[in-house]
Image: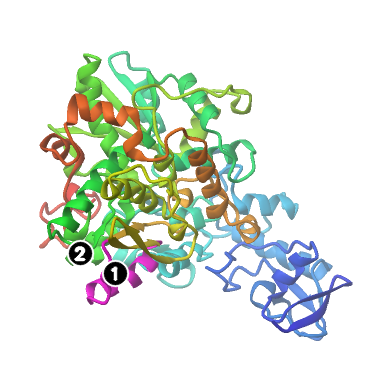
Amino acid sequence: MEKVKLTINGIEVEVPSNYTVLEAAKEVGIDIPTLCYLKGINEVGACRVCLVEVEGARSLQASCVLPVRDGMVVKTNTKKVRNAVKTTVELILANHNRECLTCFRNGSCELQKLAEELGIDEISFEGAKREATIDEFSHSIVRDSSKCILCGRCVSVCKNVQGIGILDFTNRGFKTEVAPAFGKSMADAPCIYCGQCINACPVAALREKSEMEKVWDALENPELHVVVQTAPAVRAALGEEFGLPIGTRVTGKMVAALRRLGFDKVFDTNFAADLTIMEEGHELLDRIQNGGKLPMITSCSPGWIRFCEFYYPELIDNLSTCKSPHQMMGAVLKSYYAQINNLDPEKIFVVSIMPCSSKKTEKEREELRVNGLKDVDAVLTTRELAKMIKQARIKFLELPDEDFDEVFGEYTGAGVIFGATGGVMEAALRTVADVLAGEDLKEIEYTAVRGIEGIKEAKVNIADKTIKVAVVHGTANAAKLLDKVRAGETDYHFIEVMGCSGGCVNGGGQPHVDAKTRMEIDVRVERAKALYEEDELRTYRKSHQNPMIKKIYDEFLGKPNSHKAHELLHTHYHAREIYPTQSNCCCSSSEEVACSCCE
């Protein structure tokens, strides 16, 4: 790559010629403020916060989109720059809902931090404010236009990373806002609720729909037996909410905190991940050996499931019939667990701690009920759990490490890697390989399916059979692969799809990471490392070796894919209309309230 030399604030720097001034400044430790900028996703120079003064230029320039050139002289901290940036931020704040103390993002808001850094202690501009829209009709995402700063980050991530584009700028001039088309609610749009827009938003214009109060009420209800389960990716990110570095594994402290919150039992969704592999792995074998529908595609990611139902309904029969792990766990807790502990299933309240905002909508699906009971009663994101721990005044960092409760706290390394892209595939291959080979194979790390490459393909040779697999994450990448499947251009046996880039470790319910940190650290990689580390520490690393999994089959389920297993652990999916109308919506609900069939 050709290099160029330029001078920034009197410091000479040599950088690749494809750099922007923003990137070049970072190379020499100079911090230029940004707001709309999101590396690789939203690089449009719209907010005018990253302005710099360039020798010879007639006006200030937006550094995030300004290419470097040889001999360029740049100043980032002149009075002219400081005044312009401060005025820009004051203008943004003039039309912003500034009730910061009661805001969901208080303390993690990028606009709040920027205002503090710029020393803004009063707003010089007063005028009309846009009429606020509070859209809280979906189970997963709340949109608050009074907090929106029109940076476009959510628009770009939805369109360019997820390939969906249900959010865009609507109306004109002063009335401009970011919203779904046709004035629809998020509940009525073909949204998959992945929450990547929440992760991208620098303020609180988009956030998860909180169920914290619902869980607090359950914990204080003496009639209820309240149990909690934690997804694998939560342990790799929760510590960030308490000041620990990105990717710090906090499994033991997380368990201790949940006990102190008052849950009757603390279980691990990893147990159900192992259960999923038993069901999904044998389902795959059955399809391969008996001429079933191939390729079989994983069904663990509810965002991906909604994407398939909306945009690729012809591939619904390719989906595994397995429920996602936390839904399986809920079904088992309200059947087997209730039975062995002589508990009334209707009095068991199951809480899932998830890295995912789409799980909130998933738990409401009619297809995920057994005998009229929801598998899961409440879903909290990683962020919500952190807020509850803080509300309870628990000193997280001082907690001892504690273990999950048995039986449903025992898990293998295969279960824990579910949280990273490629993890479900690798876990499945570890079990499928042993079943096909009829022995305990020693080579269990399928590194070809690891990493953050958008689409990964591999051929695995097991017992004279060649299993062709693919792993894809982020729905825009999924669409590229699925178009080939739909056109008959591929012949895979098994495909893993995760709705979020990087998998669950980067889910829409994980701790907020500001744009500047994302320039320096790939959170997907760092959080995934924590899961693979835990995998290597486990005594058992294959799902079928989990002694508690063997126990539940021996005592209750019989065998994988049995009638009992299908009754509790499997489900079905259906095509969904994009923007259903009154005439084609089966329940003819109003546009203001989400109906169960359109959730």
Task: Give, as a three-letter code, the residue at label 2.
Answer: Leu
| Left/right of residue 380 with respect to residue 2 in the rendered view | left
Instruction: Measuring from the top left, give residue 501's x and y in whole percent.
Output: 45, 59
Instruction: Measuring from the top left, give residue 5's x and y in whole percent.
Output: 81, 80
Residue 485 falls within the magenta-colored stretch: yes
Dot 2 crowding, Cα within 10 Å, few <14, some 14–19, many 20+: some
Task: Give, as a three-letter code, the residue at label 1.
Answer: Leu
Which residue is labeled 2 in the image? 315
Residue 385 falls within the magenta-colored stretch: no
Marks 2 and 1 in Cβ contact (< 8 Å): yes
Q: Does residue 140 appear in this view?
A: no
Instruction: Measuring from the top left, give residue 273's x and y in whole percent.
Output: 34, 40
Q: Which residues are magenta?
A: 473-493
Dot 1 crowding, Cα within 10 Å, few <14, some 14–19, many 20+: many
Foreground residue among 279 and 49: 279
What residue appears at the point 68 percent right and 54 percent down from the top-left corner? 114
